[in-house]
Amino acid sequence: MTIQQCKYVLAVAKTCSFNEAAKQLFVAQSSLSISINSLEQELKIRIFERSGKGVYLTDEGAEFVKYATQICESSDYVAERYKTKSIKDKLYIATQHYDFVADIFGNFLKSVKSESYRFSIREIETYNVIHDVETARSDIGIIAIKDSDLDVMKRYLGKKSLSFTSVIKVNPHVFFRKAHPLSNYDRLSTSDLKEFPYVSYEQGEHNTSFFTEELCNVSYIDKHIEISDRATLMNVLMLTDAYTVGTGIMPSALNKGDIISIPFESDEFYIIGYLLNEERKLSDTAGTFIELMEASLKKI
C-alpha cells in the first residue's frame, strides 16, 4: 500500500467516479483503476462497487477511507513541516474550544517580529489535543481539566510522557445570549436550567467523562445538542435559549457582548493549563507563547 494509492481512493470516493477522479489527478483512468485494484487485492477487500448510477463505497471501503484520510493528512503535514525547515520561528498549538486561546494567540502574533514564520492553531477534541502533543504534531496543547479528573488525567498523560502545567483555576459559568430568560440571575443551578437545551462539544469515539470539556452531567438533561466547532456553538446560543457551561473566560471582543456568562453552582472547578512532550526540547517561540499565556490568564 502506498500513499499515492490512498490518494487515489480518496479522490474516487469524493467524486463517485473513476473518470472524474482521474481527470482531477491528471492520470489515466486505466492507471487509476489498476492501482486501486492492486490495493484491493493486497488488502483482500473490495473498496468500491460499480452500478449504473455510478461508483459507491462498500462497508469495507468506507472503513478504509477513514484510515486513508489519516495517512494522507499525516503525509501532507510531515511534508509541510520539513519543507519549512529553514524557517526559524515555528509554533504548532492544539487546543480545546476556548475563545481565550484565540485571543492570546492574536496577541502573540502582534508580538512577532520575524520576517518569516509558520504558526498553526487547531481547535480539536480533548483526545486529539493530547495525541497531537504526544506525536509531536503540536508543540503545545491547551486544555482545561475538571478538578475531580485531575489525578486520573495526570496518570494518563504520564504514560504518554506528557506533562501538564496548571496555570489557573476557575469556577464554571453558564453561557447564553444576553436576552435569555435567565440573564438576570446572579447564580444558576441545574434546576434553573432543566427546561433549556444544553449544548456541548462532541468528543467523537473518545467520549469518556474526563475528555469532556464541560462540567455538566448530561444524564439529567432532557434536551442535549452536540456540536463540533465554536462558530456553530455561538450561533446556536445567539439564536435560541440554549446554554453551555464553560470556564467563564470569554473575551468580549470576540462576541461583542451578545453572549454573557453567569456563575454555575457546582463543587467542581476547572484547572486550565498546557501540555508539553517531556521528550522534546521547548523552542524559544513556544516558550514566548507560554509566557504570554500565563501572564494573560493570571490577570483574570
Image (tube, helix red, strand yellow):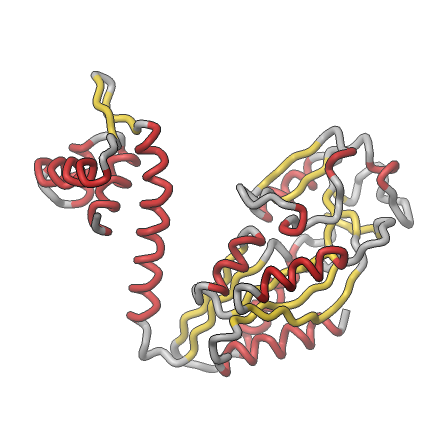
Front in this rendered view, residue 168 or 179: 168
The residue sitting at 50% across, 79% down in the picture is: 282
Q: What percent of the width, then of the height, locates residue 182?
A: 85, 40
201 to 74, vertically: above or below: above
Is 187 displayed left or right of 246 in the figure? right
The residue sitting at 14% across, 39% down in the picture is: 38
Front in this rendered view, residue 260 or 94: 94
The residue sitting at 54% across, 59% down in the picture is: 130
Q: What percent of the width, then of the height, locates residue 243?
A: 74, 41
140 to 98, vertically: above or below: below
The residue sitting at 89% across, 44% down in the picture is: 184
- Residue 135's quadrant in the figure? bottom left
- Residue 45's quadrant in the figure? top left
Residue at far right of view: 186
| Residue 98 shows in the view | yes
Q: Quadrant of the C terminus?
A: bottom right
111 to 126, vertically: above or below: below
Q: What percent of the width, then of the height, locates residue 209?
A: 67, 46
Q: What percent of the width, then of the height, locates residue 289?
A: 57, 75
